[in-house]
Image: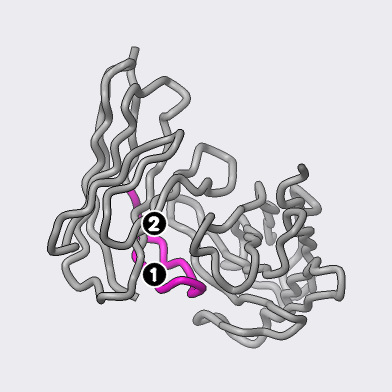
Amino acid sequence: DAKTTQPPSMDCAEGRAANLPCNHSTISGNEYVYWYRQIHSQGPQYIIHGLKNNETNEMASLIITEDRKSSTLILPHATLRDTAVYYCIVSLGGNKLVFGAGTILRVKS
Amino acid sequence: DAGVTQSPTHLIKTRGQQVTLRCSPKSGHDTVSWYQQALGQGPQFIFQYYEEEERQRGNFPDRFSGHQFPNYSSELNVNALLLGDSALYLCASSLGQGGVNYGYTFGSGTRLTVV
């Protein structure tokens, strides 16, 4: 599984968009980009995933660059409840998830 | 719709003892994976069970073993506990070995403390 690089922490004002970057320069053609988040004392929560195209769901948007070497998770209107550790993972479908250290997102009022 | 259920939520064991953790997958899911999360770190993959067989395994010693039952529930067993086994143990379920379309659903975990 390819490795990912994320900033250790980020701050965001409540109500503003949170843009979380992820580099995955060694991603292979059939690997997906997954985003999970983990709120303190809970298990990780699936947010979104994509292969090549940009994706949007009720939680977030995922923007993947054309060369697929990086991506950005966008939370359009961050709330205090979005404070969590966000993990960017690249993986083959059906394969194990390899978690890195993730990005600690702090949403501040 | 019940999500992933893990039991117990907390557990304290002594070095050298054995422990069994239990997981009921989300309704409709048939694959269970186990992860270990040490304090301040990301989860580490232990193994995955599908059709009652271990399908993938991470870099964990044989002291870690598992089982999946016909109703898709699963157990994680750890023998000869070490202090370093203290961690949050997470169970994740999915439909098929995929997890591609909807990702994996995680439980809230079992906090194991070895003293």
- Helix, strand or loop for the magenta stretch, by majority: loop
Which one is in front, A8 or A26? A26
> Where does the image place residue B102, in percent across and percent down from the top left?
53, 55
Residue pictured at 54% horizontal, 64% vertical: B99
Mark 2 Cα shell of 10 Å, populated few (<14), some (14-19), many (≥20): many
Q: Residue furthest front?
A: A53
Q: How many marks?
A: 2
Dot 1: element: strand
Which one is in front, A87 or B20? A87
The answer to whether residue B74 of the structure is visible from this angle is yes
Say which mark, if any, is on residue B32.
none
Q: Earlier in the sequence, mark 2 or mark 1?
A: 2
Mark 2 touches mark 1? (CB < 8 Å): yes
Q: Which residue is mark 2?
A: A34
Magenta span: A90-102
Residue A100 inside the magenta-drawn segment = yes
Which one is in front, A101 or B3? B3
Say which mark, if any, is on residue A91.
1
Badge 2: chain ID: A
> Where does the image place residue B21, in percent across and percent down from the top left?
77, 63
Q: Quadrant of the C terminus of chain A?
A: top left
Q: CA distance from mark 2 to mark 1?
A: 8 Å
Q: Quadrant of residue B93?
A: bottom right
Badge 1: chain ID: A
Residue pictured at 78% horizontal, 70% vertical: B75
